[in-house]
Amino acid sequence: MCRLAGIYHPDSLNLKDTIVRMRDSMQHGGPDDAGIFLHDKWPLALGHRRLSLIDLTSAGHQPMTFPERGLTIVFNGEIYNYQEIRNTLTHLGYQFHTSTDTEVILKAYDRWGIDCFDFFNGMFALAIWDEMKQELVLARDHAGIKPMYYYISGETLVFASEIRAFQHSDIHFKEHPKWKASFLAFGHLPEPITTLDGVVPLEKGTALVFSVPSLSSKKYTLFKWKFSSDLIEEEEAIFLIRETIQKSVERHMISDAPLGLFLSGGIDSSILTIIASNAAKSLQTLSIVFKEQKFSEEKFQKIIVEQTKSSHTSYLVTKKEFDDNLFDSLLAMDLPSLDGINTYFISKYARAHGLKAVLSGLGADELFGGYPSFYNQSKINLLNFLPDKLLLTFQHLPDYRLRKISYIGIHNTAAEYLTHRGIFTPLSIAEILDTTQDEVVQTITDISKSYYPGSLKNGNRMSWMETSYYMQNQLLKDADYMSMWHGLELRVPFLDKELMMLVSQVNPTLKYNRKTPKYLLVKSFMNELPEQIWNRKKQGFTFPFDGWLKENQFSKPTNLQETILYEKFNKGTISWSRYWCGLLMNRFNDKLKYAA
């Protein structure tokens, strides 16, 4: 797990200084080592910060080269099946000088070219310079777990793991004109929107190959998530899901550095703990608890700890702890997001505990149908028959939870998602930004053009929706930059490539059971999973923000717009998340900037 940056810029005054600035703006994500590559002919530079987890020696230094072939790589992530690929390459005559997965990528690329990515099961964002072909390859994993952003204009290409790095290049970037409206609608920035105009994420499951010096490019699709109904027998589905999850957890536990697990007390992390405790001699688990019992899941965490005999540590987060760390958690935000502060705290404690990698249950809700959206979908579909003009009047309802139903009247996938998870409606956004409702609707419509659910229906459609919008743009981004701020790698076994492919083949009538959320996942581990864990109301991993924000100094209003939102928040006519959204939108650039 690392951070990387690169630049091809003929007009750069000092390429070395530029790449070092970009690289070191992300030092938090790679505290163990640093390196750069400067081409002796082209204005090309690569930078890397290392968080060492596999082969902790200096042999894992990056940029790493394969001199005989003229290949140089900077790599962020983990290839969990690298040992099997290494064995294959060894049989084909390749010799290895390190124990790293990085060297395996280099030699796999030498052998198979772009096709090598078909063999990788892991999370990655990487760049490979191919001297013989005079090509630069950028690639990102199947689920977009690891981030990669890039900017191309004329003869200039810039790329990095974090948006903040672009601010340290010698190029002036303007603010993206649509980011604020997007954020107020979604509570995060949906790809391809970022805060910087022209800086976009590399699509997940995609490689871009740039030719030097023209920077002409070719796009390759490395992975396409497809749904089918091929798996229709419940017993077979349960057997395969159980077996695949167990293998995924075992793969994700590969590490030469201390590794632990986030235990929330819910179904997903409990299953991971049960499996991991059988695979490890001594498993370290961590949890967050609160004095406010409404938010604390301590009693459920204790059930799993007692069952698995894990070495467990609970961390009490108080309002004072929240106040003391709030500003630092906001600096950790590479892009504005309503969520992520919870991950900031658990990551902070994990790193202080001596861990360098942790397993998380992220992804299970999206794959197996764990959110209310899966079961509210049929009710919302009934409202599609109402006239659009009537639906848009829902924006005027006094209950903010009902206002988002107005999104049904905007017919695209982004609006469909926002019907379930929207923060502000187009009318409210227009009022906040002093623009027109039509302009806001156009922004949402433009975003939807990047998302294609095809003919998916019902549960599979919602799974695609929650994965493509919510998980991709909020959960994974929050998890990455909050954990990496503390020099911690966060691993997500439920997003294992083999598991995602398997679950997508299960017949939706079998997969989504209205009476039991995550029915197949629960059934797969029914013998080990205590009923107190699976047979209870879902409780999200969240903080007592409602009370804490009202008394926090940073969250006090500083202008008329914030004061109006704050008064609504105090009266209970809008939720804490809507007030917090307006606050972050106003202050993200002015108060936070980008931390070096």
Image (cartoon, rainbow, N blue to C red):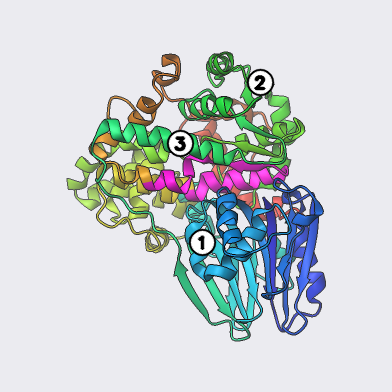
How far is disc 3 from disc 2 in space, using C-alphas? 23 Å
- Residue 419 placement: quadrant: top left
Report the span colored magenta: 472-501
Q: Nearer the viewer, mark 3 or mark 2?
A: 3
Compared across the picture, whether 444 is left or right of 394 comes to right
Between residue 428 and residue 448, name the one nearer to us: 448
Dot 3 or dot 1: first in sequence order is 1
Q: Position of residue 357 (x, y in %)?
A: 66, 39
Label of residue 312 in the image:
2
User: Looking at numbered disc 2 in the image, what kind of residue is underneath it?
Assistant: His
Dot 3 or dot 2: first in sequence order is 3
- For label 3, the residue is 245
Assign the magenta stretch its main secondary structure: helix
Q: Position of residue 428 (x, y in %)?
A: 44, 48
- For label 1, the residue is 117
User: Looking at numbered disc 3 in the image, what kind of residue is underneath it?
Assistant: Ile
Vertical placement of 341 versus 318: above or below? below
How far is disc 3 from disc 1 in space, using C-alphas? 22 Å
Label of residue 66 in the image:
none
